[in-house]
Image: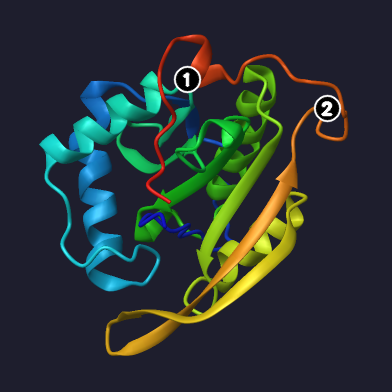
Amino acid sequence: MTTDRNNVETGSATDSGDRVLVRSATHDDIAEITAIYAHSVATSAASFELVAPTVDEMTARFNKVLAARCAYLVAASHVGSIVGFAYTRPFHERPAFGWTVEDSIYLAPDAQGRGIGRRLLARLVAEAETAGFRQMIAVIAAGASPGSVALHRAMGFADAGLLTRVGFKLGRWHDIAYMQRPLGDAAADDAPIPPPGLQSGVKPGGGR
């Protein structure tokens, strides 16, 4: 089971996020990415990790995402600071799952409710389709991240299952919701091209 959970809130705000640039992440962004993720680990069940990873560990995870031909994005403010990040990664390590990815989205507290999460998710979907992936899965701490559930629903994800009371954090049990969105030619029955990660000789990794 993955440890990263989607942490996105929706809502209205005077700043729509139009001045935020969504772009591919680089190694120079990892320190700010780590700080955003550390806040989520410490204050919410958006991630089921209990101890925030170091910059070195986040760098290793970043490299693994890129090696699997998945997308890693950041949202940068008009002054250049990172206010959110998002990525996909292989949903499962078994090769037959190679056309399916899982998404994760994290925002800084003051970036929530501005439409930034929606822009990040839309870009993830577009890049996954371009890469040849067929399905995207969201794994969400349901009660702790209602905004994330709503966002994914609005972006075409359907409920795919609920695991109850599977994680204990911050003094309470949490449910996990699975949501699923088809990508590209997902309904085709013909054999697809090799999944993007395997095209480069990289074995998908998911740990499930």
- Residue 109 rendering spot, x and y as whole percentages: 36, 61
- Which residue in the protein does label 2 denote? 185
Residue lying at the far bottom of the rendered structure:
171
Residue 50 percent across, percent down from the top left: 21, 67
Of the residues shown, which amino acid type is indicated by label 1? Arg
The reply to whether residue 10 is in sight is: no
SS category of the residue bearing label 1: loop
Q: Earlier in the sequence, mark 1 or mark 2?
A: 1
What residue is at 43 percent from the left and 51 percent from the top?
208
Q: Image check: 167 left or right of 97?
A: left
In the displayed structure, 26 sits above or below 61; it is above
Tell me the kind of residue under disc 2. Asp
From the image, tell me which residue sits under label 1.
69
- Identify which residue, 107 or 181, lies in the foreground: 181
Q: Work out how far the residue at label 1 is from the one at label 2, CA to CA, in angstroms.
A: 19 Å
Q: Residues within 10 Å of mark 1 (few under 14, many from 20)?
A: many
Task: Name the residue at 52% across, 44% down.
Answer: 103
**Tags 1 and 2 touching, CB below 8 Å:** no
| Coordinates of residue 41 in the picture (x, y in percent) | 26, 63
Q: On the rendered image, what quadrant is the N terminus found in? A: bottom left
Viewer-side residue, 197 vs 73: 197
- Residue drawn at x 87%, y 35% is 187
Quadrant location of residue 39? bottom left
Crowd tier of the residue under label 2, counting other residues whose Cα lies within 10 Å: few below 14, some 14–19, many 20 or above: some
Residue 59 falls in image quadrant: top left
